Structures are given as structure tokens and as C-alpha cells.
Image (cartoon, grey):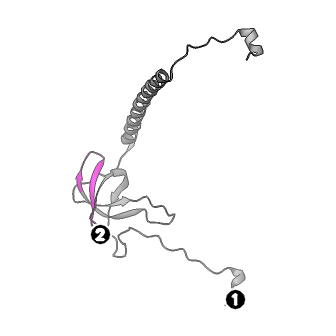
Amino acid sequence: MRLPVDLVYGLPKRAPEESVGKYTRRLRQDLEQLYEEIRGRAGREQRRQKFWKDRKAHGPVYEPGDQVWMQVPERTKLGAYWDGPYEVQKKLDWNTYQVKEMKGRRRRLVVHFDRLKPYHATSEQEGARGRQRERRKTRRPAWLQDFI
């Protein structure tokens, strides 16, 4: 099929016919090369971001035997944000600790120090899930005050 643009610029040159086998080998090689390049870039970017996060990170230094709260990613809006107490078992790196749950399952976890804070026991009422938020007190609406 010829188009008006072909009259102005001429017909495009045809590429030599390529067998399906050659095409798939070339495509696979190109994709593997692209994958390696992307993986290298992603690794460099990950190291760069880690460098800047670690450079700006600051906080208390924990010793083995210290008790800490551990931040828990709760899915509920009013859930507890801190769980504990946990005991620091050992320092794995300058910013990573192995902690052990003091109550319950006694599981051991490896945690970054920005998810830890010092534990100070304030009362017996604080449960194993940390400080619970107080329930909101609600009143009946004014227009319902007449009804029992």
C-alpha cells in the first residue's frame, strides 16, 4: 500500500527477512541486557537512598538487656502504635538490633532502630499491646434528649 507521504519521502527500506528463531534469540538477548542494566541502576539507587536515610537517622543507642517499645504497623486508625516490652538481645549493626518479645510467644525479630523507643513502665494497666487509646465518649444528640 502506498501513501501520499511515500511519494514525498520515498518508500521505506525493507529490513531483511529474519527467521523466528533468530528474532527470538535477538529479542531474548536484548531483554537480558536491558534487565541487567535496570538491575544495576536499581541497586545503585537503593544504596544511594540507604546512605541518605542512614546519614540522617539518629536516636538512642540500645545495649543488650535494654527494654524497648517496638512500632507495629497497625491497619486500624485507632489501634496501638507500639508493642512491648521487648528486650534487646544483641546489636547486629550500628542501626539494627535483634529483639526478643518478653511476654507471649518469645519470638526474636531483627528491627531497625527507628522502629524502637525506650520502654518506661508507667503502670500495670498497660497491656502487652502497648498504650491503648481511650475510647471516645459520645452523647446522645440534642434532638433525642426527649426520648428514653
**How far from the left and from the top, in percent, is residue 148?**
66, 90
According to the image, label 2 marks what residue?
104
Picture quadrant of residue 50:
top left
Tell me the quarter of the image containing the N terminus. Answer: top right
Classed neighbour count for the residue bearing mark 1: other residues with Cα under 10 Å, few (<14), some (14–19), many (≥20): few
| Numbered label attached to residue 115 | none
Disc 2 is placed on an element classified as loop
User: Is 125 left, or right, of 7 in this rendering?
Assistant: left
Q: State the CA–CA distance, disc 1 to disc 2.
A: 47 Å
**How far from the left and from the top, in percent, is residue 22?**
47, 21
Residue at (27% x, 45% y) in the render: 94
**How far from the left and from the top, in percent, is residue 103?**
28, 69
Picture quadrant of residue 36:
top left
**How far from the left and from the top, in percent, is residue 79?**
47, 66
Residue 56 visible in the shown view: yes
Disc 1 is placed on an element classified as loop
Residue at (34% x, 56% y) in the render: 116
Reading the chain from its start, which is encountered first: label 1 or label 2? Answer: 2
**Does residue 96 sit above or below 12 in this rendering?**
below
What segment is highlighted magenta in the picture? Answer: 89-107
**Does residue 146 sit above or below 65 in this rendering?**
below
Mark nearest the camera among 1 and 2 is 2
| Badge count | 2
User: Is 4 left, or right, of 73 in this rendering?
Assistant: right
Amino acid carrying mark 1 in the image: Phe
According to the image, label 1 marks what residue?
147
Classed neighbour count for the residue bearing mark 2: other residues with Cα under 10 Å, few (<14), some (14–19), many (≥20): few
Give the camera-side residue of 120 and 11.
11
Of all residues, the one furthest to the bottom in this rendering is 148
